[in-house]
Image (spheres, helix red, strand yellow):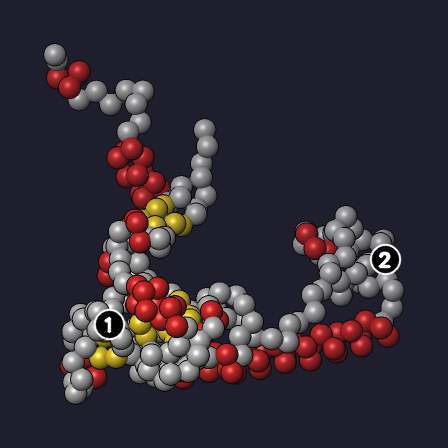
């Protein structure tokens, strides 16, 4: 085989490696990246700050937050919704007393054309935009469901070694254990929060022990299904963990 045959670059095959290399260099095409274990949130970290919680609380959907972070978020969202309702009330009052020839706030010129004809929402063919009424309830930033401060349940993790300082505890990989079985808690261990006591236990302990009597083993209070909150945890780095570990960024695609 000649040297030209060995270094031939005129083949009809466009390999996957060449495609990824050209995509990264050109800035076109959708990029995908597999996330590793270091990019996954630990089960005891806040969903907003992504840091280990000092005063953890959990929502009815099982999302863990730092109390200060989620309360600050609720206050900010309430203020924003109040502002939107106030602006909507002013707009409704202004629209009731305004003229009927106003289209989206733009007044037609002498010839009947709009001054900003290049804006899609102001063209004559564009229909009237329907404004949505601002909501009154704040929604959870993770689940999207309505959330109140009264819905937050305090969480009490059981330390693997009592008496350690916070810095010493954070330096350990195995920080917390099940409050009943003393099994180590991690992202690979499905666990739940018991509403009456706030204790964190494994789901295996729930199925084998707690569901038989439906009573909180720490506080002694009776339990319902709503009192057993399954804690949402991060992935483990494996595809079988049930967590999406693939990052995707959509970019323009050039087609031949």
Residue 223 is left or right of residue 44, and the answer is: right
- Provide residue 78's location: percent of width, then percent of height: 57, 80
- Which residue is rendered at x = 79% and y = 61% of the image? 103
Q: Secondary structure at mark 2?
A: loop
Q: Residue furthest front?
A: 213
Residue 173 is left or right of residue 191, and the answer is: left
Q: Nearer the viewer, residue 80 or 169?
A: 169
- Which residue is rendered at x = 76% and y = 53% of the image? 127
**Image position of 31 with respect to 181: above or below:** above
Residue 228 visible within the image: yes
- Which residue is rendered at x = 19% and y = 77% of the image? 160
| Residue matched to label 1 | 181
- Which residue is rendered at x = 31% and y = 35% of the image? 19
* Mark 1 or mark 2, earlier in chain: 2
| Residue matched to label 2 | 110
- Provide residue 4's location: percent of width, then percent of height: 17, 17
**Image position of 112 with respect to 72: above or below:** above
Tell how many labels: 2
> Within 10 angstroms of label 2, few (less than 14), some, or many (20 or more) residues?
few
- Provide residue 162's location: percent of width, then percent of height: 18, 84
The reply to whether the C-beta atoms of the residues labelled 1 and 2 are less than 8 Å apart is no
Q: Assign the N terminus to one quadrant of the image.
A: top left
Q: CA distance from mark 1 to mark 2?
A: 81 Å
Q: Assign the C terminus to one quadrant of the image.
A: top left
């Amino acid at each position: 085989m000649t040297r030209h045959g060995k270094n031939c670059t005129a083949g009809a095959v466009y390999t996957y490696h060449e495609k990824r290399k050209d995509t990264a260099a050109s800035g076109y095409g959708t990029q995908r990246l597999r996330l590793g274990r270091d990019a996954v949130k630990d089960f005891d970290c806040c969903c907003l700050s992504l840091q280990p919680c000092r005063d953890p609380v959990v929502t009815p959907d099982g999302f863990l937050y730092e109390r200060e972070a989620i309360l600050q978020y609720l206050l900010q969202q309430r203020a924003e919704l109040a502002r939107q309702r106030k602006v909507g009330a002013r707009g409704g009052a202004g629209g009731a007393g305004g003229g009927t020839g106003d289209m989206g706030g733009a007044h037609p010129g002498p010839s009947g054309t709009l001054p900003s004809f290049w804006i899609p929402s102001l063209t004559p063919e564009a229909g009237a935009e329907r404004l949505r009424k601002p909501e009154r309830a704040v929604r959870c930033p993770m689940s999207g469901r309505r959330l109140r401060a009264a819905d937050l349940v305090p969480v009490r993790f059981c330390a693997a070694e009592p008496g350690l300082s916070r810095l010493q505890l954070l330096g350990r990989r195995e920080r917390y254990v099940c409050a009943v079985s003393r099994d180590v808690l991690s992202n690979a261990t499905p666990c739940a929060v018991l509403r009456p006591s706030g204790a964190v236990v494994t789901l295996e302990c729930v199925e084998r022990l707690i569901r038989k009597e439906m009573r909180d083993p720490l506080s002694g209070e009776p339990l319902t299904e709503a009192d057993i909150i399954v804690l949402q945890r991060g992935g483990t780095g494996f595809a079988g963990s049930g967590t999406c570990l693939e990052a995707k960024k959509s970019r323009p695609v050039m087609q031949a």
